[in-house]
């Protein structure tokens, strides 16, 4: 979530669905790594993959937009390894894993209880 928030992916999707290659270009990131990130986040309901490789916002990712009153985008700044994940997305590193998301997702749900049912 940190990498998605810092890269501004939710902001990029506010005008509609985009492919992972478009998101990679818009964020200056490595396309295959963005695809892995988006699929991982879609698997827990943060984004939705509407067609293969095409992603859109969900009610949960709405909170990652910087232009909404209930934005939690900056909550992710406190996670130490988030910057490492973001750098992996900008490079061609293939060590990206989804394990780093579990604790931040629990904290996110604690701060935004209306999304608790998304993770049961």
Image (cartoon, helix red, strand yellow):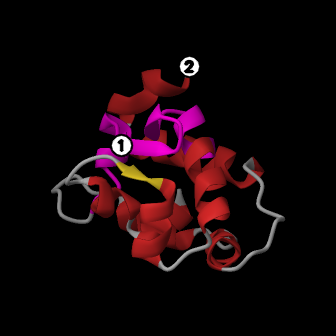
Is 33 left or right of 2, judged from the image as shown?
right
The picture quadrant where one finds residue 50 is top left
Residue 61 belongs to the span the image colors magenta = yes
In the picture, which quadrant includes the C terminus? top right
Task: Find the magenta span and give its range.
Answer: 40-65
How crowded pointer 2 is (Cα within 10 Å; few <14, some 14-19, many 20+) is rated as few
Q: Nearer the viewer, residue 109 or 93?
A: 93
**What x and y, as percent, mark residue 100?**
72, 55
Picture layout, residue 86 above or below residue 112:
below
Residue that numbered label 1 is attached to: 56
Kindly state the secondary structure of the residue where label 2 is placed: loop
Q: Position of residue 119 (x, y in %)?
A: 54, 27
Disc 2 versus disc 1: nearer the observer: 1
How far apart are the alpha carbons under marks 2 and 1?
22 Å
Q: Is 72 positioned to the left or the right of 69 in the image?
A: right
In the rendered image, residue 11, in percent from the top left (x then y), is placed at 29, 62
Q: Which residue is mark 2?
A: 120
Determine the residue positioned at 46% across, 41% down. Answer: 46
* Left or right placement of residue 103 versus residue 5 in this view: right
């Amino acid at each position: 979530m940190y990498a998605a928030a810092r890269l501004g992916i939710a902001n990029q999707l506010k005008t509609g669905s985009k492919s992972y290659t478009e998101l990679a270009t818009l964020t200056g990131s490595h396309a295959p790594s963005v695809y892995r990130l988006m699929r991982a986040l879609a698997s827990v309901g943060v984004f939705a993959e509407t067609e293969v490789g095409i992603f859109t916002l969900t009610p949960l990712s709405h909170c990652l937009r910087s232009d909404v009153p209930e934005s939690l985008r900056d909550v992710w700044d406190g996670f130490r390894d988030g910057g490492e994940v973001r750098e992996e997305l900008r490079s061609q590193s293939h060590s990206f894993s989804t394990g780093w998301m579990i604790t931040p997702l629990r904290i996110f749900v604690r701060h935004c209880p209306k999304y608790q049912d998304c993770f049961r």
